[in-house]
Amino acid sequence: MEVILKDDVKGVGYKNDIVTVKAGYGRNYLIPQGLAEMATPSARKVVAENTRQAAHKAEKIQKDAQELANRIGDTLLEIPAKAGETGKIFGAVTTLQVSEALKALGYDVDRKRVDFDQEVKSLGEYTATLNLHKEVKHQIRFNVVAA
């Protein structure tokens, strides 16, 4: 089943992409959630026209994302967390905490755009990937310290 994505869907594709998904996934999840629509010939023409018109806007958005990645650079974040004597933290560090730490430094990054390379369950230094744009991904280091 071919669908046109109305929004970025992790693991599937980006907005306005025409992707092939299993029929049940498209019919029971993507379309009812408003994340996709059927890829009919008329819908394909509409998407092609919208994409053509939005090309220069997309270039500006990509440039802004690249600029943000350059400003963030090699910033090392400090994330405080409650931890036991062995260095294991209670709970886990979430994408929300990384997003808020970036926001405190003046960088506005949505928590949905933050991905961890591994689970953060103990004190130490980790890396996260910021998906600022479909063509701009930035690695950021953060240090989990005892609070």
Image: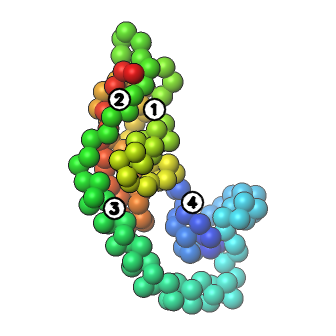
Q: Amino acid at mark 1?
A: Val
Q: Amino acid at mark 3?
A: Leu
Is residue 60 depicted above or below 7 in this figure? below
Q: Amino acid at mark 2?
A: Val
Q: Which residue is mark 1?
A: 93
Select label 1 or label 4 by which is in front.
Answer: 1
Q: What is the spatial separation of the Cα atoms under label 3 and label 4, in whole angstroms? A: 22 Å
Q: Are marks 1 and 2 in contact (CB under 8 Å)?
A: yes
Q: Which residue is mark 3?
A: 68
Q: Residue at x 30, y 66 (%)?
A: 67
Q: Is residue 28 visible?
A: yes
Mark found first going from the N terminus, 1 or 2: 1
Mark found first going from the N terminus, 1 or 4: 4
Q: Are marks 2 and 4 in contact (CB under 8 Å)?
A: no
Is residue 11 depicted above or below 117 in this figure? below
Side of 128 where 14 appears, left or right? right
Q: Secondary structure at mark 4?
A: loop
Side of 57 where 6 appears, left or right? right
Q: Residues within 10 Å of mark 1 (few under 14, many from 20)?
A: some
Mark found first going from the N terminus, 3 or 4: 4
Q: Which residue is mark 2?
A: 144
Q: Which residue is mark 4?
A: 9
Q: Nearer the viewer, residue 3 or 138?
A: 138
